[in-house]
Image (cartoon, rainbow, N blue to C red):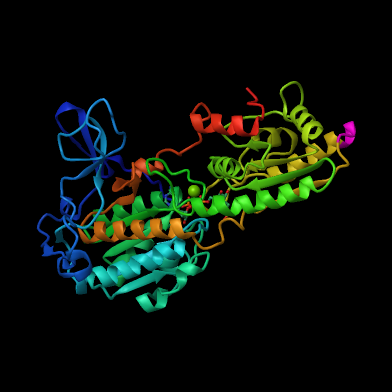
């Protein structure tokens, strides 16, 4: 696998007076200075021409943090508030591609996520209806599809209904990122806009594709659309599909709760996705109100002794006669490796493969409650992990996916490249790849949201 970092060409920082910093994204003219520009075809589009100030000012930027002690604006110009800013997403007055010159491709990589098909649909429709583009292809089966599979022709008709389906119509995969073969394929096929939909691994892959494209001096825009069901991508407000996943997770929690409360001392355990971040578990718990204890990777816990999980289970069963435990898949991995042999295995993309915490914890609880006769050992273990991500996006995610897709299309048409897009403080922005791949967004257990959870479940903090 290639290494995703090349700070020199990925970092474009502009500093203004008074501490203003723009973490800008690359532009094709950074290495192809004499490119021609064309008027944006949207200016003649009857739907958009009525909007006042439809085009985004080239100098508009979005503040990462709104400093209320200074100016409390989110969109500012150069020399505005101090702090980090990103370029505001949206249509520009000038574009760097003629409609009939564009040959776009779309690829989806990594794990599934609700809304993937909506993003594909809206890139195709955005390119077609807003910019008059007709040459759009889909890459089959993730990065490796660039060099090992045939492409799929994408038209508004082909993608018309796909947002109603879960998964990705293009297929996806882990591993197989061969930068030079991918860029050879881009070059050989005459592709000049690459839309890459995927998580942190995918965006690292997109960054190296951009670097190689630039090294070869190609007029190719590489645009990323961040995807992760775990909501662990930093900088952006939230990731698409997360809202849908939380909603679906609630259904599983409800089922576990109904089962648990229907029997004496019933315990429902619901295992949810969240490799390194417990956002799905935390939000599903807060939303459902049926959960007695939520365990996430960011908050270590222990089983035995004073203040431990077993003591809490005994107390809750005594009080309520049943309980529901939600556990994120990455929680308690340190405890598992102590009691099981660590496998240390990785998937094809190099992600650590986790041991099954749902199976482990339910087994440990069963043994404990049996020993103390606190329960008749009735236990339901719900593992809806794949059910919450293999579904279509809900209404809110679908609207969000549309905005993301349109931001990416506007950015590529305006000649930006090596960027990913997403809402920052509610405003869609173009963000350099390195900013979203250098770290993960995690639940901060000293923040108010986790405190709200602790107070709503009244579980121990295990500190
Ligand atoms: N550091 C990296 N450099 C280049 N490609 C990468 C890197 N990490 C992951 N990839 C590629 O990105 C794709 C998706 O990565 P993966 O981690 O499986 O999912 P996600 O993008 O959802 O995090 C895979 O094809 C993988 O080979
Ligand atoms: O079974 P798979 O495809 O490896 O997916 C499992 C993983 O996918 C995730 O949903 C995250 O996937 P991504 O990194 O692709 O966003 C994790 O929560 C989970 O550990
Ligand atoms: Mg990932």
385 above or below 303? below
- From the top left corner, tell me how far across and down residue 447 is, in percent: 49, 28
Camera-nearest residue between 166 and 32: 166
Q: Is residue 66 left or right of residue 256?
A: left
Question: Is the stretch drawn in magenta largely helix, strand or loop?
Answer: helix
264 above or below 49? above
**Point 21% across, 32% down: residue:** 81
Camera-nearest residue between 175 and 181: 175
- Residue 188, by quadrant, is bottom left
Instruction: Confirm whether the magenta stretch covers residue 162.
Output: no
- From the top left corner, tell me how far across and down residue 107 is, in percent: 41, 63
Instruction: Confirm whether the magenta stretch covers residue 371.
Output: yes
**Point 71% across, 32% down: residue:** 338
104 above or below 414? below
Query: The C terminus is located in which quarter?
Result: top right
**Point 19% across, 70% down: residue:** 46
- From the top left corner, tell me how far across and down residue 274 is, in percent: 57, 44
Total count of labels: 0
Region rendered in magenta: 370-374
- From the top left corner, tell me how far across and down residue 183 is, in percent: 33, 61
- Residue 184, by quadrant, is bottom left
Q: In this view, does 127 lie to the left or right of 391?
A: left
Q: Is residue 120 left or right of residue 305?
A: left
Camera-nearest residue between 311 and 299: 311
């Amino acid at each position: 696998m290639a290494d995703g970092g090349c700070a020199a060409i990925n970092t474009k920082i502009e500093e203004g007076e008074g501490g203003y910093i723009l973490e800008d994204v690359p532009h094709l003219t950074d290495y192809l200075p004499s490119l021609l520009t064309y008027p944006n075809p949207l200016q003649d589009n009857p739907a958009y021409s009525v909007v006042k100030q439809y085009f985004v000012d080239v100098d508009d930027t979005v503040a990462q943090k709104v400093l209320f002690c200074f100016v409390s604006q989110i969109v500012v110009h150069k020399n505005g508030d101090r702090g980090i800013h990103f370029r505001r997403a949206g249509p520009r007055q000038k574009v760097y591609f003629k409609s009939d010159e564009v040959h776009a491709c779309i690829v989806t990589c990594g794990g599934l996520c609700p809304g993937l098909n909506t993003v594909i649909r809206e890139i195709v429709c955005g390119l077609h209806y807003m910019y008059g583009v007709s040459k759009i292809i889909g890459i089959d089966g993730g990065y490796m599809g660039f060099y090992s599979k045939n492409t799929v022709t994408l038209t508004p008709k082909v993608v018309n209904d796909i947002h109603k389906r879960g998964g990705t119509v293009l297929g996806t995969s882990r591993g197989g990122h061969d930068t030079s073969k991918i860029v050879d394929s881009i070059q050989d096929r005459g592709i000049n806009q690459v839309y890459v939909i995927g998580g942190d691994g995918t965006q690292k892959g997109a960054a190296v594709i951009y670097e190689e494209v630039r090294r070869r001096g190609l007029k190719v825009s590489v645009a990323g659309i961040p995807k992760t069901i775990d909501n662990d991508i930093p900088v952006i407000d939230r990731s698409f599909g997360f809202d849908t996943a939380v909603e679906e997770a609630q259904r599983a929690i409800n089922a576990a709760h109904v089962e648990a409360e229907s029997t004496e001392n019933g315990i429902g355990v619901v295992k949810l996705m969240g490799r390194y971040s417990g956002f799905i578990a935390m939000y599903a718990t807060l939303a459902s109100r049926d959960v007695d204890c939520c365990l996430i990777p960011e908050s270590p816990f222990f089983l035995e002794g004073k203040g431990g999980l077993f003591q809490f289970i005994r107390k809750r069963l005594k009080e309520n006669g049943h309980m529901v435990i939600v556990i994120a898949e990455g929680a308690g991995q340190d405890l598992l490796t102590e009691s099981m042999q660590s496998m240390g295995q990785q998937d094809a993309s190099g992600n650590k493969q986790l041991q099954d915490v749902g199976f482990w914890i339910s087994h440990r609880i069963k043994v404990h409650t049996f020993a103390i006769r606190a329960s008749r050992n009735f236990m339901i273990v719900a593992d809806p992990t794949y059910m919450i991500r293999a579904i279509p996006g809900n209404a809110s995610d679908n609207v969000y996916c549309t905005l993301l897709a349109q931001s990416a299309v506007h950015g590529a048409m305006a000649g930006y490249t090596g960027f990913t897009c997403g809402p920052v403080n509610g405003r869609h922005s173009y963000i350099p790849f390195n900013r979203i791949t250098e770290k993960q967004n995690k639940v901060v257990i000293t923040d108010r949201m986790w405190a709200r959870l602790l107070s709503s479940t009244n579980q121990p903090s295990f500190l």
